[in-house]
Image (cartoon, rainbow, N blue to C red):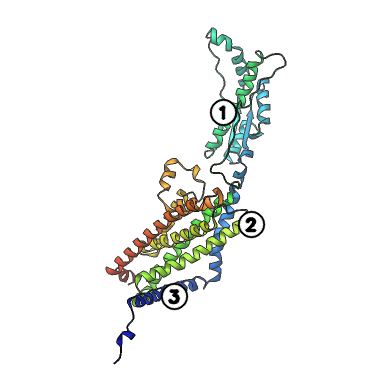
Amino acid sequence: MINHSVFQSSPANVSRANLFNSARLVWDLTRKDLLLFFLDPRAAVLCFAIPIILGLGFGKIFESTRDVAKTKLSMILVVEDDHPLTRQLVQAIRQSPRIGIREETRAEAQALLTARRGNVAVIIPSGMGASLSEKTQLIRSKLWQKETEPVTPAMRVIHSPEALLEASWAEGVMTEIVWKELAGKWLASLLPPGAAPSFERPFPLEQEAFPKSSASFNSYSHSFSGMSLQYLLFWGMDSGLLLLRERKRGVWRRLRSAPVPLSLLLLGRIVSTTLVAFAQVLLTMGFAWAFCGVTLQGSYLGFVIMALSASLMAATMGMLVAVMGQSEARARNLAIVAILGMSMIGGYWLPSFLLPEWVKLGSMAFPTTWALRGFEGIFWTGANLWETCRCALIVSAYSVAALVIAFWWLARQETHGILEKGQS
């Protein structure tokens, strides 16, 4: 008598077989997308080279921020007064370590500002030196006799429309220099013979970064992190648009006619996009480490985890935009606006401290902000493994949510026959 139980598979064996078949299907779909990606070698090279070029460009632009203490305000000085006190002020301005000046006439200064060859000009008008001297002579009579103070000519600060920050800087420096010189004249009669007034800071001041990092700020660490993350999003968009091209050409219909679940089709596309994005991060940050002095201050394991979570974010966000866009042109426009907006708000272009407070607060709702925070913690501030994993978990949570919404939206479209209408 034949024992049929020998030929019957246990539920555990069947489950393992199904899992193995599903994994093989996902790998076959992933391999298909990877072969298509490397089918055009020049496009593949550009895909890896562009974030490196962008990181180099932005890092070079902001490299001067590494020596903020040595940065000088470039200022045009117009002197229309020849009073001895004015000459004393001009000499103090020339000796100031905070500003670099070029002396011009008023007409020349206006011409330079108009031609955008200068940002800020300070005009010392005629009569200012005499007025300031009279003010120092009238200080006693002003306090005791309440005499009318003479009107002092206005020192003017003119600037180009985009140089508001430099204008405020010039105003503060000029105010400090004038007060120091005038206070010296006021106190000269009160000091002992041979003594000179000192206007150094009367208290010690120490400045340090917190949390402390073993490496100083490197502008390339921010630029390569920001540009790499931004290009990951564009790569995710391009991968998502490939799905729409397959739908338009009928390739998607042939894939759906095969006995492959929709979830595995999406998973194969997500895995292939994530792998290419992960390779982009490794190559881009490896270049920054080898040639731009960007060092890994955090955990190596944290870097791998953060890179994988950012790559998964790019893949799922691109898929979500493609699925919801329905047409390639509509999805591309929607994706470009979303990527540029999240990149700007997330601090990929400029450091976040330059943004308004409400923008910085609102940026915490976007995964791009947490991705950049994780990368900067690894390459700059020396964040530990837990801090990096916390950022990676937040980014991954957004990725899972995007994947779930993309799957639900695509399944809903197929159920209602939207895909077939779009292909016809």
Q: Which residue is mark 2?
A: 291
Image point 57% across, 21% down: which residue?
153
Q: Position of residue 68 (x, y in %)?
A: 60, 40
Nearest the camera: 95 or 112? Answer: 95
Q: Disc 3 marks which amino acid?
A: Asp
* Left or right of 18, for residue 85: right
Q: Position of residue 404 (x, y in %)?
A: 35, 62
Q: Which mark is first along the chain, 3 or 1? A: 3
Other-residue count near label 1 (Cα within 10 Å), few / some / many at <14 / 14–19 / ≥20? few
Tag 1 and tag 3, C-beta contact below 8 Å? no
Nearest the camera: 56 or 380? Answer: 380
Quadrant for residue 30, please give it: bottom left
Alpha-carbon distance for marks 1 and 3? 71 Å
Residue 28 - label: 3
Residue 371 visible to an observer of this rendering = yes
Q: Which residue is mark 1?
A: 156
Q: Disc 2 marks which amino acid?
A: Phe
Q: Disc 1 marks which amino acid?
A: Arg
Quadrant for residue 327, please give it: bottom left
Tag 1 and tag 2, C-beta contact below 8 Å? no
Q: Position of residue 252 (x, y in %)?
A: 37, 73
Disc 2, SS: helix
> In the picture, which quadrant includes the N terminus?
bottom left
Alpha-carbon distance for marks 2 and 3? 37 Å
Q: Position of residue 378 (x, y in %)?
A: 53, 52
